[in-house]
Image (cartoon, rainbow, N blue to C red):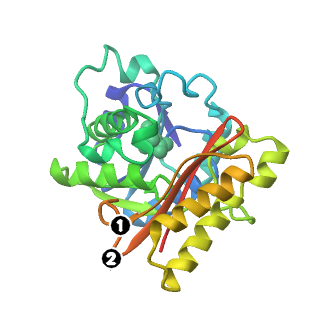
């Protein structure tokens, strides 16, 4: 695996490499990332991963400084997964001057996670567009665990007519159902034992909707109450339309249930399609 930190070196390394498939990450790789790398192989000739902890998408009181940085272990995993090229820029490589031109997503950036993380999706869309311009992939893969992020990136790619196929990879889970996440490492043993409750509740909601329950607000409130009674601090549990994350009430379209809740100091997000 070849590793490049400079934009110019990466660009020359990617000349004449056939169809490029790209998997951007912030490192601290787990089986969810590796599954995306393995799927990537089927979509092109050269698999490119990136590792960059993007300051722009973290709020002032968020975990940018303590976000786990495990570069050598990540390189070993990427090489073992058959990744051809790793782009690992420093902040000076990617943001040599203040990033004043940004991608401002529409209203979707202010709902659900966006309501609790103002500016987050602006930071994600900006870095992803910049990475797309650097790597120039034919296809890019993102995990469905970040469902709203995937939607923002899909919509941006479509509306800006970027010639890139966006593919969503299924969420990879631990045996007890907890969605794999770089932030799971923050959990104490007791919190880790409690954490699968989130996925269990999402499944209960899915079962209730499939069984014909139409009062989505009641289901959302019940799940929030159960989480909070177990010591979580919940930002939202929301049943939404898959197509655009708009409200689900009274519609007969594919739905998704999404949640974000804090266990101790760790904010976990998860979702399942209904
Ligand atoms: O999902 C992530 O790891 C990040 O949000 C991404 C897409 C790499 C942009 O920094």
Q: Residue pushed farthest top? A: 97
Q: Position of residue 39 (x, y in %)?
A: 48, 64
Residue 169 badge: none
Near-viewer residue (93 or 183): 183
- Examine the image and state in which quarter residue 171 appears: bottom right
Disc 2 marks which residue?
253
Question: Can the viewer see residue 49 in this picture?
Answer: no
Near-viewer residue (212 or 6): 212
Asked if the residue under mark 1 is in contact with the one under mark 2, i.e. CB atoms within 8 Å, the reply is yes
Residue for point 34% across, 62% down? 247
Disc 1 marks which residue?
241
Q: Position of residue 236 (x, y in %)?
A: 51, 51
Q: Secondary structure at mark 2?
A: loop
Q: Is residue 145 above or below residue 88?
A: below
Question: Can the viewer see residue 160 in this picture?
Answer: yes
Crowdedness near tag 1: few (<14), some (14–19) or many (≥20) residues, C-alpha within 10 Å: many
Near-viewer residue (118 or 146): 118
Q: Is residue 248 above or below residue 91?
A: below
Residue for point 69% across, 45% down? 184
Q: Is mark 1 within 8 Å of ligand 1?
A: no
Q: Is residue 20 above or below residue 101?
A: below
Residue for point 60% across, 61% down? 223
First reached walking from the N terminus: tag 2 or tag 1: 1
């Amino acid at each position: 695996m070849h590793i490049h930190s400079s934009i110019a070196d990466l660009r020359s390394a990617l000349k004449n490499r056939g169809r490029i498939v790209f998997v951007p990450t912030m490192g601290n790789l787990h089986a969810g990332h590796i599954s995306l790398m393995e799927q990537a192989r089927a979509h092109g000739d050269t698999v490119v991963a990136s590792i960059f902890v993007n300051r722009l998408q973290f709020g002032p009181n968020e975990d940018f400084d303590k976000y786990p940085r495990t570069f050598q272990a990540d390189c070993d995993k990427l090489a073992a997964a058959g990744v051809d090229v790793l782009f690992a820029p420093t902040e000076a490589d990617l943001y040599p001057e203040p990033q004043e031109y940004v991608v401002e997503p529409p209203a979707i950036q202010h709902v659900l996670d966006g309501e609790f993380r103002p500016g987050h999706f602006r930071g994600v869309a900006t870095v992803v567009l910049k990475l797309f311009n650097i790597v120039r992939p034919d296809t890019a893969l993102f995990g469905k665990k970040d469902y709203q992020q995937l939607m923002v990136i899909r919509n941006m790619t479509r509306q800006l007519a970027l010639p890139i196929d966006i593919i969503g990879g299924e969420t990879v889970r631990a045996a007890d159902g907890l969605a794999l996440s770089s932030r799971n490492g923050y959990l104490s043993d007791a919190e880790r034992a409690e954490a699968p409750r989130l996925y269990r509740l999402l499944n209960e909601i899915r079962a209730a909707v499939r069984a014909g329950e139409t009062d989505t607000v009641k289901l959302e409130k019940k799940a929030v109450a159960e989480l909070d009674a177990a010591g979580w601090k919940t930002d939202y549990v929301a049943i939404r339309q898959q197509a655009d994350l708009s409200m689900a009430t009274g519609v007969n379209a594919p739905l998704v249930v999404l949640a974000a809740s804090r266990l101790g100091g760790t904010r976990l997000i998860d979702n399942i399609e209904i």
